[in-house]
Amino acid sequence: MKEEIITLGIESSCDETSVSVVKNGREVISNIIDTQIPIHEKYGGVVPEIASRNHIEAISRVTKRALQEAKMSWDDIDAITPTYGPGLVGALLVGVSYAKALSYAIKRPLVGVNHIEGHIAANYITHKELRPPFLCMMMSGGNTQIVYVKDYTEFEVLGKTRDDAIGEAFDKVARVVGLRYPGGPKVDKLAEEGKITIQFPKTHFENLDFSFSGIKTAVINLHHKMPDINKADLCASFENAVTEVLIENIQKAIEQTNIKTVVLAGGVSANLYIRKAFLDLEKNNVKIYMPDLKLCTDNAAMIASAGYYNFISGKRSELNLNAIPNLKL
Ligand code: KG4
């Protein structure tokens, strides 16, 4: 194996077209992110067909820029690592098809990457010393789960949401209080100005599963009954309720596994209130890692990092690689 492995990450699972060049899974040489947020904003959410069309228009341009910025040519690339799931099928297919054509044309191996693994790997870029095993609190728009990361490519899901993903709950609460898509960051900002004045009902399970639909519905019902309620207080109280559930479950997971390293991942790990609540656990001898804010949401650097670990573990995909919208860890 060469000393220096360069992976080309390709991400198109939702509304970001991103391509990145990463060295040895840890060093980002370039990471171009072309976001479609302004396009989908006016519809209040991602429109799948429009997302696919925009990925098609962007993918060649974004790839060229990623190579140019890295000052590299195709010859420098050792493996092409696209996200192949989970995500929107039409959007995923753009990145997967482009990667397959590239792999064939430049004669480099293709390694399909699970998007959730990518979110976890964002932490390897931010924290050069981080190594498995650890627990991961995975929180995104499509997933909420506690993952036992046994090794770079070996995972066990210890608990997961039974209904809404946490990011979905944030986005729905945002819409109800009149904040535009993507609402999560806007709820985060508004909540900073508010006080925790309402205790929302929380759902607990015997195991490490989550449920966020009850909290979300309680927020929506309260807002319908009292449309003049202070929105900043409502957001702060919602954020506090979901954070308490996350913290309770991660504490249970730490007790059950005796693993005291916890890593945050996914778009919602950009939430400042949640980041602070997890950092508070360090008082109890728990080590907390979280990705740089710019690596929390979708980007191809994290995909290239996960791609690197899959590549060196020997994983290869064939040219019949397909998009898998509901791919699990
Ligand atoms: O991980 P991600 O970029 O996409 C998926 O793979 O799902 O996560 C997107 C989700 C959205 O629901 C967005 O509202 C939420 O992450 N999000 C946030 C924040 N930043 C992004 N939620 C709460 N606070 C934030 N600061």
Image (tube, rainbow, N blue to C red):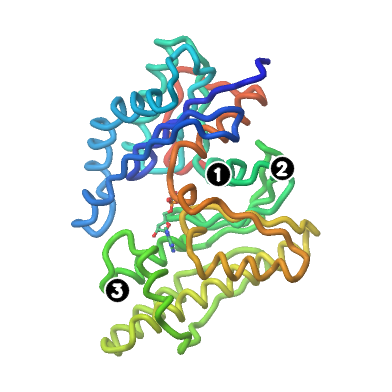
Residue 252 vs residue 28, the one in the foreground = 28
Helix, strand or loop for disc 2 = loop
Helix, strand or loop for disc 3 = helix
Label 3 is placed on what type of residue? Val
Q: Earlier in the sequence, mark 2 or mark 3?
A: 2
Residues tagged 1 and 3 counted as in contact (Cβ below 8 A):
no
How packed is label 3: few (under 14 Cα within 10 Å), some, or many (20 or more)?
some
Residue at image location 53% in from the left, 22% down from the top:
317
Q: Where is residue 20 in the image (x, y as percent from the top left)?
A: 45, 32
Q: Position of residue 215 (x, y in %)?
A: 46, 76
Residue 292 vs residue 245, the one in the foreground = 292
Q: Which of marks 1 and 3 is nearer the N terminus?
A: 1
Residues tagged 1 and 2 counted as in contact (Cβ below 8 A):
no
Residue 161 drawn above or below residue 106: below
**In 3D space, how far apart are the residues under numbered discs 2 and 3 (Cα atoms)?**
41 Å
Residue 190 vs residue 45, the one in the foreground = 190
Residue 171 drawn above or below residue 240: above
Query: Mark on residue 122?
Result: 1
Query: Mark on residue 131?
Result: 2
Foreground mark, 2 or 3? 2
Query: Residue 2: which quarter of the image?
Result: top right
In the rendered view of the protein, which quadrant contains the C terminus? top right
Q: Which of marks 1 and 2 is nearer the N terminus?
A: 1
Residue tagged 3: 176
Number of marks in the image? 3
Q: Position of residue 41 (x, y in %)?
A: 23, 56
Residue at image location 71% in from the left, 39% down from the top:
151
Ligand 1 lies in which image quarter?
bottom left
Label 1 is placed on what type of residue? Ala
How packed is label 2: few (under 14 Cα within 10 Å), some, or many (20 or more)?
some
Residue 214 drawn above or below residue 259: below
